[in-house]
Image (cartoon, rainbow, N blue to C red):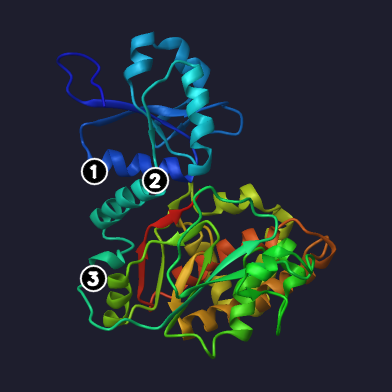
């Protein structure tokens, strides 16, 4: 990083982005390094963005470029606090404006910072900090993919306990990808036909109904390009300490977690969910107003959990989603817009925050591109 002059040794930088990744990285860097000064959140356009976040201005890229000299633009670091798969595009945009010192915030780097930040806050403990164990548990993880997912330049080399499951097979009854997959979501008892709305939740349902009996001590869901960062030693730590579930470090949404559903879910659909929650699970409905004020949110539906915890969660969430389909307009079977898939991220967050008795630990997420 650079200083603003010979006497000022503090380090100034911009973050590109103004959503959950950027907010978390901003808070972590400012907390972990007292010499770090964030000049602003850079965005391509101010439309749809707040004027400031945590008292730090949100600045349109063109405006920032106009105010800075060419040398300043070459030197000042710009942290790419946006999804990793668009880093290359963003770098090109920044370079066109003269910004040359782009710092990619990879998923690994983000996880490292968030782990240290949450440790300082005494929140969301890391599985990596547990003392060592000696027994490796039996683990069954299912990596969900869809027929239309793009091919990866650097596909993952998953451990042997990770099995591929192809989703939406009821709509795509043949093809090379089905032959390559370990499991298909339209076999046994399934809801494969709901995949256009449910996304990776058809994998959760298939595992719940068809794989739990033969699964190991822990069962989980990854994506074809996202996984939890867990080593064999971490699995042994989980077994040693009776960990109920491991999830990725939660992301920060402002003003609270409801920012997520207002971005991805129509308000009428959300009201249908609240009505279904009140009808089916009144205790959760009473807790919702308090829990929803949390700024912490579990994105992506990534989890590795004890078999019973996984089963209990599925037994809770699928009746709820089914009732949402009945109450929403248009009804779930009349549409295909992923709304229940997005909704399930909020419901997983609600479930985890509600069950404070569970021993929940965290790790970073690995992103494959």
Q: Work out whether 20 lies above or below 42.
A: below
Q: Residues within 10 Å of mark 2 (few under 14, many from 20)?
A: many
Q: Residues within 10 Å of mark 1 (few under 14, many from 20)?
A: some
Q: How crowded is mark 3: few (under 14 residues within 10 Å), some or many (20 or more)?
A: some
The N terminus sits in image quarter: top left
Does residue 333 appear left or right of residue 71 in this picture? right
* Residue at screen point 34% across, 46% down: 109
Q: Check contact, mark 1 vs mark 2: CB within 8 A.
A: no
* Residue of label 2: 24
* Residue of label 3: 130
* Residue at screen point 53% across, 59% down: 300
* Residue at screen point 35% across, 52% down: 111
Q: Residue furthest left?
A: 7
* Residue of label 1: 32
* Residue 36 shows in the view: yes
Q: Which of marks 1 and 3 precedes in the sequence? A: 1
Q: Is mark 2 on a helix, strand or loop?
A: helix
Q: Work out whether 245 lies above or below 52.
A: below
Query: Mark 3 or 1, which is nearer the eye?
Result: 3
Of 260 and 139, the residue lying toward us:
139
Of 282 and 205, the residue lying toward us:
205
* Residue 69 shows in the view: no
C-alpha span from label 3 to label 1:
22 Å
Does residue 157 appear left or right of residue 279 in this picture? left
Q: What element carries label 1?
A: helix
């Amino acid at each position: 990083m650079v200083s603003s002059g010979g006497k000022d040794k503090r380090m100034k930088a911009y973050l590109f982005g103004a959503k959950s990744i950027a907010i978390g990285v901003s808070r972590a860097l400012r907390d972990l390094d007292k010499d770090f000064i964030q000049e602003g959140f850079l965005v391509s356009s101010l439309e749809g963005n707040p004027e400031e976040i945590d008292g730090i201005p949100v600045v349109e890229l063109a405006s920032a470029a106009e105010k800075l000299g060419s040398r300043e633009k070459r030197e000042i670091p710009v942290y790419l606090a946006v999804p990793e798969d668009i880093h290359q595009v963003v770098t090109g945009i920044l370079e066109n404006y003269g910004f040359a010192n782009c710092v990619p915030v990879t998923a690994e780097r983000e996880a490292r910072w968030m782990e240290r930040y949450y440790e300082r806050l005494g929140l969301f403990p890391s599985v990596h900090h547990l003392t060592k164990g000696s027994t490796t548990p039996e683990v069954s993880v299912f990596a969900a993919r869809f027929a239309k997912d793009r091919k990866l330049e650097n596909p993952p080399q998953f451990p042997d306990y990770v099995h591929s499951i192809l989703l939406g097979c009821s709509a795509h009854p043949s093809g090379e990808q089905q032959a390559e997959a370990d499991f298909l979501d339209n076999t046994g008892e399934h809801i494969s036909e709901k995949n256009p709305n449910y996304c990776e939740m058809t994998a959760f349902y298939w595992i719940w109904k068809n794989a739990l009996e033969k699964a190991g001590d822990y069962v989980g869901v990854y994506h074809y390009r996202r996984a939890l960062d867990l080593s064999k030693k971490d699995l042994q730590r989980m077994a040693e300490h009776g960990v109920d579930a491991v999830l990725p470090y939660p992301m920060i949404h402002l003003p609270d977690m409801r920012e997520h559903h207002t971005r991805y879910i129509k308000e009428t659909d959300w009201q249908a969910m609240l009505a279904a929650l009140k009808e089916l699970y009144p205790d959760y409905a009473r807790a919702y107003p308090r829990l929803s004020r949390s700024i912490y949110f579990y994105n992506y539906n990534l989890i590795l959990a004890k078999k019973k915890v996984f089963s209990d969660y599925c037994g809770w969430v699928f009746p709820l989603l089914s009732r949402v389909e009945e109450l929403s307009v248009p009804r779930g079977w009349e549409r295909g817009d992923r709304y229940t898939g997005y909704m399930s991220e909020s419901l997983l967050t609600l479930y985890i925050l509600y069950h404070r008795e569970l021993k929940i630990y965290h790790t970073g997420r690995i992103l494959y591109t």
